[in-house]
Amino acid sequence: MTAAFDEAVLRGVVPQVIAVLVRRGADFAAAEDAVQDALVEALRSWPDDPPRDPKGWLVTVAWRRFLDAARSDAARQRREAAVDLEPAPGAAAQVDDTLRVFFLCAHPALTPTSAVALTLRAVGGLTTRQVAEAFLVPEATMAQRISRAKRTIAAEPFDRPGDPATVRRVLYLVFNEGYGGDVDLASEAIRLTRELAALARDPETDGLLALMLLHHARRAARTRADGTLVPLAEQDRSRWDTAAIAEGARLLQAALAEDRRGEYQLQAAIAALHADAPSAAETDWVQVVEWYDELLALTGSPVVRLNRAVAVGEADGARAGLAALAEVDPALPRHRAAAAHLHEKAGDRAVAARLYAEAADLASSRAERVHLIRQAARLNGSG
Amino acid sequence: MPKYLILKHYRGVPAGTVNDHPMEEWTPDEVDAHMAFMDAFGKQLEADGEFVDAQALSPEGAFVRANDAGTGPMTDGPFAETKDLIAGWYVVDVDGWDRAVELAGQLSLAPGKGGRPIHEWLEVRPFYGAPSHQD
Protein backbone atom coordinates (compact mmCIF):
# COMPACT_ATOMS: atom_id res chain seq x y z
CA MET A 1 0.00 0.00 0.00
CA THR A 2 2.26 2.77 -1.25
CA ALA A 3 -0.36 5.10 -2.73
CA ALA A 4 -0.61 8.03 -0.34
CA PHE A 5 -3.94 9.75 0.08
CA ASP A 6 -3.90 12.69 -2.28
CA GLU A 7 -6.88 15.01 -2.27
CA ALA A 8 -5.76 16.59 -5.53
CA VAL A 9 -5.81 13.20 -7.29
CA LEU A 10 -9.21 12.53 -5.78
CA ARG A 11 -10.56 15.84 -7.06
CA GLY A 12 -8.95 15.46 -10.46
CA VAL A 13 -10.99 12.41 -11.47
CA VAL A 14 -14.37 13.83 -10.40
CA PRO A 15 -15.59 15.11 -13.79
CA GLN A 16 -14.58 11.79 -15.41
CA VAL A 17 -16.56 9.85 -12.82
CA ILE A 18 -19.60 12.07 -13.29
CA ALA A 19 -19.28 11.56 -17.04
CA VAL A 20 -19.18 7.75 -16.64
CA LEU A 21 -22.37 7.81 -14.58
CA VAL A 22 -24.09 10.07 -17.09
CA ARG A 23 -23.01 7.75 -19.93
CA ARG A 24 -24.53 4.86 -18.02
CA GLY A 25 -27.86 6.68 -17.89
CA ALA A 26 -27.86 8.81 -14.76
CA ASP A 27 -29.01 12.38 -15.24
CA PHE A 28 -26.43 15.03 -14.44
CA ALA A 29 -27.89 16.14 -11.12
CA ALA A 30 -28.24 12.59 -9.80
CA ALA A 31 -24.76 11.68 -11.00
CA GLU A 32 -23.29 14.76 -9.34
CA ASP A 33 -25.07 13.97 -6.06
CA ALA A 34 -23.88 10.36 -6.15
CA VAL A 35 -20.27 11.39 -6.84
CA GLN A 36 -20.42 13.86 -3.95
CA ASP A 37 -21.56 11.07 -1.64
CA ALA A 38 -18.71 8.90 -2.91
CA LEU A 39 -16.24 11.75 -2.37
CA VAL A 40 -17.28 12.24 1.22
CA GLU A 41 -16.88 8.49 1.72
CA ALA A 42 -13.44 8.64 0.07
CA LEU A 43 -12.29 11.50 2.31
CA ARG A 44 -13.31 9.38 5.28
CA SER A 45 -11.91 5.98 4.30
CA TRP A 46 -8.98 6.58 1.92
CA PRO A 47 -6.46 7.87 4.47
CA ASP A 48 -6.60 4.47 6.21
CA ASP A 49 -7.32 2.32 3.19
CA PRO A 50 -6.24 3.90 -0.12
CA PRO A 51 -7.60 2.12 -3.22
CA ARG A 52 -5.27 0.94 -5.97
CA ASP A 53 -7.49 2.49 -8.64
CA PRO A 54 -9.01 5.74 -7.27
CA LYS A 55 -11.18 6.37 -10.31
CA GLY A 56 -12.52 2.80 -10.39
CA TRP A 57 -13.27 3.00 -6.67
CA LEU A 58 -15.16 6.27 -7.12
CA VAL A 59 -17.13 4.94 -10.10
CA THR A 60 -18.13 1.80 -8.16
CA VAL A 61 -19.16 3.63 -5.01
CA ALA A 62 -20.87 6.50 -6.84
CA TRP A 63 -22.75 4.08 -9.09
CA ARG A 64 -23.93 2.13 -6.04
CA ARG A 65 -25.09 5.38 -4.42
CA PHE A 66 -26.88 6.33 -7.61
CA LEU A 67 -28.65 2.96 -7.81
CA ASP A 68 -29.67 3.22 -4.14
CA ALA A 69 -31.18 6.61 -4.80
CA ALA A 70 -32.78 5.46 -8.05
CA ARG A 71 -34.34 2.38 -6.43
CA SER A 72 -36.14 4.51 -3.91
CA ASP A 73 -37.78 6.35 -6.76
CA ALA A 74 -40.22 4.27 -8.77
CA ALA A 75 -39.93 6.45 -11.83
CA ARG A 76 -36.21 5.88 -11.92
CA GLN A 77 -36.51 2.10 -12.04
CA ARG A 78 -37.21 2.33 -15.74
CA ARG A 79 -33.95 4.15 -16.27
CA GLU A 80 -32.19 1.55 -14.21
CA ALA A 81 -33.50 -1.14 -16.54
CA ALA A 82 -32.42 0.84 -19.57
CA VAL A 83 -28.95 1.17 -18.10
CA ASP A 84 -28.36 -2.56 -18.41
CA LEU A 85 -28.62 -2.23 -22.17
CA GLU A 86 -26.10 0.61 -22.36
CA PRO A 87 -22.65 -0.36 -23.59
CA ALA A 88 -19.79 0.23 -21.19
CA PRO A 89 -18.15 3.62 -21.72
CA GLY A 90 -15.08 3.58 -23.93
CA ALA A 91 -11.85 5.32 -23.04
CA ALA A 92 -12.00 7.63 -26.06
CA ALA A 93 -15.38 9.08 -25.12
CA GLN A 94 -14.26 10.13 -21.67
CA VAL A 95 -12.15 13.07 -22.76
CA ASP A 96 -15.10 14.61 -24.57
CA ASP A 97 -17.35 13.80 -21.64
CA THR A 98 -15.12 15.65 -19.19
CA LEU A 99 -15.19 18.65 -21.49
CA ARG A 100 -19.00 18.48 -21.54
CA VAL A 101 -19.09 18.54 -17.74
CA PHE A 102 -17.05 21.76 -17.99
CA PHE A 103 -19.54 23.19 -20.51
CA LEU A 104 -22.58 22.17 -18.51
CA CYS A 105 -21.30 23.74 -15.30
CA ALA A 106 -20.59 27.00 -17.11
CA HIS A 107 -23.97 27.03 -18.85
CA PRO A 108 -25.17 30.54 -19.77
CA ALA A 109 -28.53 29.85 -18.05
CA LEU A 110 -26.71 29.94 -14.71
CA THR A 111 -25.82 33.11 -12.86
CA PRO A 112 -22.04 33.60 -12.68
CA THR A 113 -22.00 32.78 -8.94
CA SER A 114 -23.94 29.55 -9.48
CA ALA A 115 -21.75 28.56 -12.42
CA VAL A 116 -18.64 29.09 -10.29
CA ALA A 117 -20.07 27.06 -7.39
CA LEU A 118 -21.18 24.20 -9.63
CA THR A 119 -17.86 24.17 -11.50
CA LEU A 120 -15.92 23.97 -8.25
CA ARG A 121 -18.04 21.02 -7.13
CA ALA A 122 -18.62 19.02 -10.30
CA VAL A 123 -15.38 19.77 -12.16
CA GLY A 124 -13.12 20.74 -9.27
CA GLY A 125 -14.32 17.98 -6.98
CA LEU A 126 -14.63 20.24 -3.94
CA THR A 127 -17.16 19.29 -1.31
CA THR A 128 -20.08 21.61 -0.60
CA ARG A 129 -18.43 22.55 2.69
CA GLN A 130 -15.22 23.59 0.91
CA VAL A 131 -17.12 25.64 -1.67
CA ALA A 132 -19.15 27.28 1.12
CA GLU A 133 -15.96 28.16 3.03
CA ALA A 134 -14.41 29.65 -0.07
CA PHE A 135 -17.42 31.95 -0.48
CA LEU A 136 -17.77 32.66 3.25
CA VAL A 137 -21.39 31.49 3.35
CA PRO A 138 -22.99 28.76 5.49
CA GLU A 139 -22.86 25.25 4.04
CA ALA A 140 -26.68 25.03 3.92
CA THR A 141 -26.79 28.19 1.81
CA MET A 142 -24.26 26.79 -0.64
CA ALA A 143 -26.06 23.42 -0.79
CA GLN A 144 -29.26 25.23 -1.81
CA ARG A 145 -27.41 27.33 -4.38
CA ILE A 146 -25.88 24.23 -5.97
CA SER A 147 -29.22 22.37 -5.98
CA ARG A 148 -30.88 25.31 -7.70
CA ALA A 149 -28.09 25.45 -10.26
CA LYS A 150 -28.53 21.75 -11.04
CA ARG A 151 -32.30 22.17 -11.44
CA THR A 152 -31.68 25.06 -13.83
CA ILE A 153 -29.58 22.94 -16.17
CA ALA A 154 -31.51 19.69 -15.61
CA ALA A 155 -33.17 19.89 -19.01
CA GLU A 156 -29.97 20.75 -20.87
CA PRO A 157 -28.75 17.94 -23.12
CA PHE A 158 -25.42 16.52 -22.05
CA ASP A 159 -24.27 15.81 -25.57
CA ARG A 160 -24.39 19.29 -27.03
CA PRO A 161 -21.03 21.03 -27.09
CA GLY A 162 -20.92 24.31 -25.21
CA ASP A 163 -18.98 27.51 -25.58
CA PRO A 164 -15.35 27.41 -24.38
CA ALA A 165 -15.44 31.19 -23.90
CA THR A 166 -18.10 30.75 -21.20
CA VAL A 167 -15.99 28.10 -19.47
CA ARG A 168 -12.97 30.41 -19.55
CA ARG A 169 -15.01 33.24 -18.04
CA VAL A 170 -16.14 30.98 -15.18
CA LEU A 171 -12.58 29.78 -14.56
CA TYR A 172 -11.37 33.39 -14.50
CA LEU A 173 -14.08 34.17 -11.92
CA VAL A 174 -12.83 31.25 -9.81
CA PHE A 175 -9.29 32.62 -10.09
CA ASN A 176 -10.34 36.08 -8.97
CA GLU A 177 -12.38 34.78 -6.05
CA GLY A 178 -9.09 34.50 -4.17
CA TYR A 179 -8.75 32.74 -0.85
CA GLY A 180 -11.01 31.46 1.87
CA GLY A 181 -11.40 28.23 3.74
CA ASP A 182 -8.88 25.46 3.20
CA VAL A 183 -8.90 25.59 -0.60
CA ASP A 184 -6.76 28.04 -2.57
CA LEU A 185 -9.15 28.98 -5.36
CA ALA A 186 -6.46 30.65 -7.48
CA SER A 187 -4.44 27.42 -7.58
CA GLU A 188 -7.63 25.47 -8.18
CA ALA A 189 -8.49 27.73 -11.14
CA ILE A 190 -5.01 27.17 -12.57
CA ARG A 191 -5.38 23.39 -12.19
CA LEU A 192 -8.79 23.41 -13.93
CA THR A 193 -7.56 25.70 -16.71
CA ARG A 194 -4.65 23.31 -17.31
CA GLU A 195 -7.20 20.53 -17.70
CA LEU A 196 -9.33 22.56 -20.07
CA ALA A 197 -6.23 23.44 -22.10
CA ALA A 198 -5.33 19.74 -22.34
CA LEU A 199 -8.88 18.74 -23.36
CA ALA A 200 -9.46 21.34 -26.07
CA ARG A 201 -6.60 23.09 -27.85
CA ASP A 202 -7.27 26.82 -28.04
CA PRO A 203 -4.74 29.69 -27.93
CA GLU A 204 -7.14 31.75 -25.84
CA THR A 205 -7.30 29.03 -23.15
CA ASP A 206 -3.49 29.05 -23.13
CA GLY A 207 -3.69 32.83 -22.89
CA LEU A 208 -5.93 32.54 -19.84
CA LEU A 209 -3.59 30.02 -18.24
CA ALA A 210 -0.62 32.31 -18.95
CA LEU A 211 -2.48 35.27 -17.43
CA MET A 212 -3.31 33.31 -14.27
CA LEU A 213 0.28 32.09 -13.89
CA LEU A 214 1.73 35.57 -14.39
CA HIS A 215 -0.63 37.08 -11.79
CA HIS A 216 -0.21 34.19 -9.40
CA ALA A 217 3.58 34.55 -9.61
CA ARG A 218 3.30 37.88 -7.79
CA ARG A 219 1.20 36.52 -4.96
CA ALA A 220 3.89 36.46 -2.24
CA ALA A 221 4.84 40.09 -2.89
CA ARG A 222 1.31 41.45 -3.12
CA THR A 223 0.47 41.73 0.58
CA ARG A 224 2.39 42.56 3.73
CA ALA A 225 2.43 40.29 6.76
CA ASP A 226 -0.46 42.29 8.28
CA GLY A 227 -2.62 41.75 5.17
CA THR A 228 -2.30 45.26 3.71
CA LEU A 229 -1.82 45.66 -0.05
CA VAL A 230 1.49 46.39 -1.73
CA PRO A 231 1.01 48.18 -5.08
CA LEU A 232 2.85 46.77 -8.10
CA ALA A 233 5.40 49.60 -8.12
CA GLU A 234 6.45 48.88 -4.51
CA GLN A 235 6.53 45.09 -4.67
CA ASP A 236 9.73 43.23 -3.85
CA ARG A 237 10.29 41.65 -7.26
CA SER A 238 12.77 39.14 -5.89
CA ARG A 239 9.77 37.44 -4.26
CA TRP A 240 8.01 36.84 -7.57
CA ASP A 241 7.82 33.20 -8.63
CA THR A 242 10.21 33.05 -11.60
CA ALA A 243 9.22 29.51 -12.60
CA ALA A 244 5.56 30.52 -12.92
CA ILE A 245 6.56 33.64 -14.87
CA ALA A 246 8.71 31.57 -17.25
CA GLU A 247 5.90 29.08 -17.83
CA GLY A 248 3.36 31.87 -18.36
CA ALA A 249 5.63 33.67 -20.83
CA ARG A 250 6.30 30.44 -22.76
CA LEU A 251 2.59 29.62 -23.02
CA LEU A 252 1.84 33.16 -24.11
CA GLN A 253 4.51 33.19 -26.84
CA ALA A 254 3.13 29.98 -28.32
CA ALA A 255 -0.46 31.25 -28.11
CA LEU A 256 0.34 34.61 -29.74
CA ALA A 257 2.18 32.79 -32.56
CA GLU A 258 -1.13 31.22 -33.63
CA ASP A 259 -2.39 34.71 -34.46
CA ARG A 260 -5.87 34.22 -33.02
CA ARG A 261 -5.74 36.86 -30.35
CA GLY A 262 -8.30 37.18 -27.58
CA GLU A 263 -8.61 39.34 -24.50
CA TYR A 264 -6.88 36.90 -22.15
CA GLN A 265 -3.83 36.67 -24.43
CA LEU A 266 -3.69 40.48 -24.59
CA GLN A 267 -4.04 40.84 -20.80
CA ALA A 268 -1.35 38.19 -20.36
CA ALA A 269 0.92 40.15 -22.71
CA ILE A 270 0.58 43.19 -20.44
CA ALA A 271 1.18 41.07 -17.32
CA ALA A 272 4.27 39.59 -19.01
CA LEU A 273 5.74 43.06 -19.62
CA HIS A 274 5.33 43.84 -15.90
CA ALA A 275 6.85 40.48 -14.96
CA ASP A 276 9.78 41.13 -17.28
CA ALA A 277 10.72 44.53 -15.84
CA PRO A 278 13.39 44.79 -13.12
CA SER A 279 11.46 47.75 -11.60
CA ALA A 280 8.25 49.72 -12.19
CA ALA A 281 10.25 52.58 -13.72
CA GLU A 282 12.05 50.24 -16.13
CA THR A 283 8.78 48.77 -17.42
CA ASP A 284 8.28 49.10 -21.17
CA TRP A 285 5.26 51.39 -20.70
CA VAL A 286 5.10 52.33 -24.39
CA GLN A 287 4.55 48.70 -25.28
CA VAL A 288 2.07 48.30 -22.40
CA VAL A 289 0.01 51.15 -23.90
CA GLU A 290 0.15 49.47 -27.33
CA TRP A 291 -1.27 46.23 -25.89
CA TYR A 292 -3.97 48.24 -24.09
CA ASP A 293 -4.84 49.89 -27.42
CA GLU A 294 -5.32 46.48 -29.00
CA LEU A 295 -7.28 45.24 -25.96
CA LEU A 296 -9.51 48.31 -26.10
CA ALA A 297 -10.15 47.82 -29.83
CA LEU A 298 -11.15 44.21 -29.11
CA THR A 299 -13.32 44.70 -26.02
CA GLY A 300 -14.33 48.38 -25.85
CA SER A 301 -14.31 47.81 -22.08
CA PRO A 302 -14.42 50.94 -19.86
CA VAL A 303 -12.16 49.18 -17.34
CA VAL A 304 -9.54 48.68 -20.06
CA ARG A 305 -9.89 52.36 -20.97
CA LEU A 306 -9.21 53.26 -17.32
CA ASN A 307 -6.16 51.02 -17.03
CA ARG A 308 -4.89 52.35 -20.34
CA ALA A 309 -5.07 55.92 -18.99
CA VAL A 310 -2.86 54.92 -16.05
CA ALA A 311 -0.36 53.31 -18.44
CA VAL A 312 -0.40 56.43 -20.67
CA GLY A 313 0.46 58.41 -17.52
CA GLU A 314 3.60 56.29 -17.17
CA ALA A 315 4.52 56.27 -20.85
CA ASP A 316 3.81 59.90 -21.77
CA GLY A 317 3.58 61.72 -18.44
CA ALA A 318 0.86 62.56 -15.93
CA ARG A 319 -0.80 65.27 -18.04
CA ALA A 320 -1.24 62.86 -20.97
CA GLY A 321 -2.61 60.29 -18.50
CA LEU A 322 -5.15 62.77 -17.14
CA ALA A 323 -6.20 63.65 -20.70
CA ALA A 324 -6.77 59.95 -21.41
CA LEU A 325 -8.64 59.61 -18.10
CA ALA A 326 -10.97 62.46 -19.11
CA GLU A 327 -12.46 60.07 -21.68
CA VAL A 328 -13.29 57.45 -19.05
CA ASP A 329 -16.66 57.19 -17.28
CA PRO A 330 -16.08 58.73 -13.80
CA ALA A 331 -18.59 56.29 -12.27
CA LEU A 332 -16.13 53.39 -12.70
CA PRO A 333 -15.05 51.83 -9.38
CA ARG A 334 -11.36 52.74 -9.51
CA HIS A 335 -11.68 56.01 -11.42
CA ARG A 336 -10.96 58.20 -8.37
CA ALA A 337 -7.98 56.11 -7.28
CA ALA A 338 -6.50 56.38 -10.79
CA ALA A 339 -7.20 60.13 -10.87
CA ALA A 340 -5.55 60.54 -7.45
CA HIS A 341 -2.45 58.67 -8.66
CA LEU A 342 -2.15 60.78 -11.82
CA HIS A 343 -2.74 64.06 -9.96
CA GLU A 344 -0.04 63.17 -7.46
CA LYS A 345 2.30 62.38 -10.33
CA ALA A 346 1.44 65.78 -11.83
CA GLY A 347 2.31 67.47 -8.52
CA ASP A 348 -1.23 68.35 -7.33
CA ARG A 349 -0.79 66.82 -3.88
CA ALA A 350 -3.84 68.43 -2.24
CA VAL A 351 -6.14 67.32 -5.06
CA ALA A 352 -4.61 63.86 -4.97
CA ALA A 353 -5.12 63.56 -1.19
CA ARG A 354 -8.79 64.53 -1.49
CA LEU A 355 -9.32 62.04 -4.35
CA TYR A 356 -7.59 59.23 -2.41
CA ALA A 357 -9.90 59.88 0.57
CA GLU A 358 -12.95 59.81 -1.73
CA ALA A 359 -11.66 56.66 -3.42
CA ALA A 360 -11.32 55.01 0.01
CA ASP A 361 -15.06 55.48 0.61
CA LEU A 362 -15.75 53.64 -2.67
CA ALA A 363 -13.26 50.82 -2.09
CA SER A 364 -14.53 47.30 -2.66
CA SER A 365 -12.58 45.67 0.18
CA ARG A 366 -11.23 46.57 3.58
CA ALA A 367 -7.64 46.02 2.42
CA GLU A 368 -8.15 48.39 -0.52
CA ARG A 369 -9.82 50.97 1.74
CA VAL A 370 -6.94 50.92 4.24
CA HIS A 371 -4.45 51.21 1.38
CA LEU A 372 -6.21 54.29 -0.05
CA ILE A 373 -6.60 55.93 3.39
CA ARG A 374 -2.85 55.46 3.90
CA GLN A 375 -2.19 57.13 0.54
CA ALA A 376 -4.34 60.13 1.55
CA ALA A 377 -2.66 60.22 4.95
CA ARG A 378 0.81 60.14 3.36
CA LEU A 379 0.04 63.20 1.19
CA ASN A 380 -1.77 65.11 3.95
CA GLY A 381 1.00 64.40 6.44
CA SER A 382 3.84 65.79 4.34
CA GLY A 383 1.86 68.71 2.85
CA MET B 1 -22.82 32.43 27.13
CA PRO B 2 -25.02 35.09 25.53
CA LYS B 3 -24.10 36.80 22.27
CA TYR B 4 -23.72 40.53 21.73
CA LEU B 5 -23.25 42.65 18.65
CA ILE B 6 -20.67 45.43 18.87
CA LEU B 7 -21.21 47.91 16.04
CA LYS B 8 -18.59 50.32 14.76
CA HIS B 9 -19.85 53.43 13.03
CA TYR B 10 -18.08 55.29 10.25
CA ARG B 11 -18.76 58.61 11.94
CA GLY B 12 -18.32 57.13 15.38
CA VAL B 13 -16.30 59.96 16.90
CA PRO B 14 -18.63 62.90 17.64
CA ALA B 15 -17.38 66.31 16.52
CA GLY B 16 -15.35 68.19 19.10
CA THR B 17 -14.62 65.15 21.26
CA VAL B 18 -11.27 63.93 22.42
CA ASN B 19 -9.60 62.77 19.19
CA ASP B 20 -11.84 63.95 16.39
CA HIS B 21 -9.81 63.62 13.18
CA PRO B 22 -10.88 61.73 10.06
CA MET B 23 -8.55 58.87 9.24
CA GLU B 24 -7.08 60.48 6.12
CA GLU B 25 -5.61 63.18 8.39
CA TRP B 26 -3.59 60.62 10.32
CA THR B 27 -0.09 59.58 9.29
CA PRO B 28 0.25 56.25 7.46
CA ASP B 29 1.91 54.84 10.60
CA GLU B 30 -1.08 55.93 12.70
CA VAL B 31 -3.42 54.20 10.25
CA ASP B 32 -1.30 51.04 10.51
CA ALA B 33 -1.30 51.24 14.31
CA HIS B 34 -5.09 51.52 14.33
CA MET B 35 -5.52 48.51 12.03
CA ALA B 36 -2.99 46.52 14.06
CA PHE B 37 -4.97 47.31 17.21
CA MET B 38 -8.18 46.05 15.58
CA ASP B 39 -6.49 42.85 14.42
CA ALA B 40 -4.97 42.24 17.85
CA PHE B 41 -8.37 42.85 19.45
CA GLY B 42 -9.98 40.22 17.19
CA LYS B 43 -7.16 37.73 17.83
CA GLN B 44 -7.43 38.24 21.59
CA LEU B 45 -11.18 37.56 21.40
CA GLU B 46 -10.46 34.36 19.49
CA ALA B 47 -7.82 33.32 22.02
CA ASP B 48 -10.29 33.94 24.86
CA GLY B 49 -13.00 31.93 23.14
CA GLU B 50 -15.26 34.99 22.98
CA PHE B 51 -15.08 35.50 19.21
CA VAL B 52 -18.05 34.65 16.97
CA ASP B 53 -17.73 36.89 13.92
CA ALA B 54 -16.26 40.16 12.69
CA GLN B 55 -16.96 41.81 9.36
CA ALA B 56 -16.11 45.15 7.80
CA LEU B 57 -18.85 46.97 5.88
CA SER B 58 -18.39 49.25 2.88
CA PRO B 59 -19.67 52.84 3.32
CA GLU B 60 -21.92 52.28 0.30
CA GLY B 61 -25.49 51.08 0.71
CA ALA B 62 -29.06 52.30 0.75
CA PHE B 63 -32.06 52.70 3.00
CA VAL B 64 -34.86 50.68 1.40
CA ARG B 65 -38.61 50.33 1.85
CA ALA B 66 -41.33 49.10 -0.54
CA ASN B 67 -43.98 51.57 -1.70
CA ASP B 68 -47.76 50.93 -1.45
CA ALA B 69 -47.79 48.68 -4.49
CA GLY B 70 -45.14 46.57 -2.87
CA THR B 71 -42.86 47.29 -5.79
CA GLY B 72 -40.13 49.80 -6.59
CA PRO B 73 -38.15 50.05 -3.39
CA MET B 74 -37.85 53.61 -2.15
CA THR B 75 -34.46 54.77 -1.14
CA ASP B 76 -33.80 57.74 1.06
CA GLY B 77 -30.24 58.95 0.85
CA PRO B 78 -27.57 56.47 1.63
CA PHE B 79 -28.94 56.25 5.19
CA ALA B 80 -31.47 58.04 7.36
CA GLU B 81 -28.64 60.02 8.86
CA THR B 82 -25.06 59.79 7.73
CA LYS B 83 -23.94 59.25 11.32
CA ASP B 84 -25.71 55.89 11.07
CA LEU B 85 -23.17 54.51 8.58
CA ILE B 86 -21.96 51.26 10.03
CA ALA B 87 -18.32 50.40 9.37
CA GLY B 88 -18.40 46.86 10.66
CA TRP B 89 -19.13 44.67 13.63
CA TYR B 90 -17.89 42.13 16.08
CA VAL B 91 -20.15 39.40 17.37
CA VAL B 92 -18.93 38.17 20.73
CA ASP B 93 -20.09 35.30 22.88
CA VAL B 94 -19.37 36.37 26.44
CA ASP B 95 -20.46 35.90 30.06
CA GLY B 96 -22.89 38.78 29.99
CA TRP B 97 -23.67 42.43 29.40
CA ASP B 98 -20.89 43.76 31.60
CA ARG B 99 -18.21 41.87 29.68
CA ALA B 100 -19.66 43.02 26.34
CA VAL B 101 -19.50 46.65 27.52
CA GLU B 102 -15.97 46.09 28.81
CA LEU B 103 -14.90 44.78 25.36
CA ALA B 104 -16.59 47.69 23.58
CA GLY B 105 -14.71 49.98 25.95
CA GLN B 106 -11.41 48.40 24.94
CA LEU B 107 -12.30 48.75 21.27
CA SER B 108 -13.20 52.40 21.78
CA LEU B 109 -9.62 53.03 22.89
CA ALA B 110 -8.20 52.14 19.46
CA PRO B 111 -5.35 54.53 18.67
CA GLY B 112 -5.86 57.39 16.23
CA LYS B 113 -4.19 60.72 15.50
CA GLY B 114 -0.99 61.12 17.48
CA GLY B 115 -1.37 57.56 18.75
CA ARG B 116 -3.98 58.80 21.24
CA PRO B 117 -7.18 56.78 21.73
CA ILE B 118 -10.10 57.89 19.56
CA HIS B 119 -12.78 57.22 22.20
CA GLU B 120 -15.07 56.08 19.42
CA TRP B 121 -18.77 55.53 20.21
CA LEU B 122 -19.67 51.86 19.78
CA GLU B 123 -23.12 50.35 19.80
CA VAL B 124 -23.62 47.21 21.90
CA ARG B 125 -26.76 45.14 21.24
CA PRO B 126 -27.69 41.85 22.86
CA PHE B 127 -28.88 39.02 20.61
CA TYR B 128 -32.29 37.64 21.52
CA GLY B 129 -31.78 35.05 24.19
CA ALA B 130 -29.17 37.13 25.98
CA PRO B 131 -30.23 38.34 29.44
CA SER B 132 -31.22 42.00 29.27
CA HIS B 133 -28.82 44.42 30.94
CA GLN B 134 -31.81 45.81 32.86
CA ASP B 135 -32.38 42.47 34.58
Image (spheres, coloured by chain):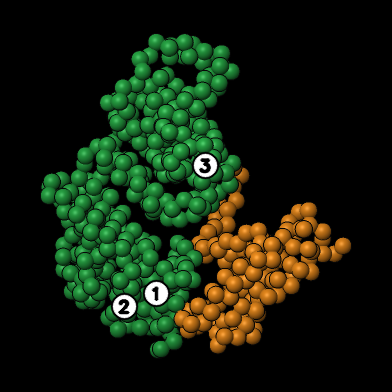
Chain colours: A green, B orange
Mark 1 residue type: Leu
Chain of the residue displaying label 3: A
Mark 3 residue type: Pro
Image x and y of residue A250, in percent = 19, 54
The structure residue drawn at horizontal position 39% and vertical position 36%, both measured from the top left corner, is A13
**Element type at marker 3?**
loop
The structure residue drawn at horizontal position 27% and vertical position 81%, both measured from the top left corner, is A346
Image x and y of residue A94, in percent = 32, 28
Chain of the residue displaying label 1: A
**Element type at marker 2?**
helix
Which residue corresponds to mark 2?
A343
Quarter location, residue A215? bottom left
Which residue corresponds to mark 3?
A47
Q: Compared to A72, does A284 lie above or below? A: below
Q: CA distance from mark 2 to mark 1?
A: 9 Å
Mark 1, Cα crowd under 10 Å, few <14 / some 14-19 / many 20+, is: many
Question: Would residue A321 be found to the left or right of residue A224 on screen?
Answer: left
Mark 2, Cα crowd under 10 Å, few <14 / some 14-19 / many 20+, is: many
Asked whether the residues under the numbered discs 2 and 1 touch, taking CB atoms below 8 Å apart as contact, a structural biologist would say yes
Asked whether the residues under the numbered discs 1 and 3 touch, taking CB atoms below 8 Å apart as contact, a structural biologist would say no
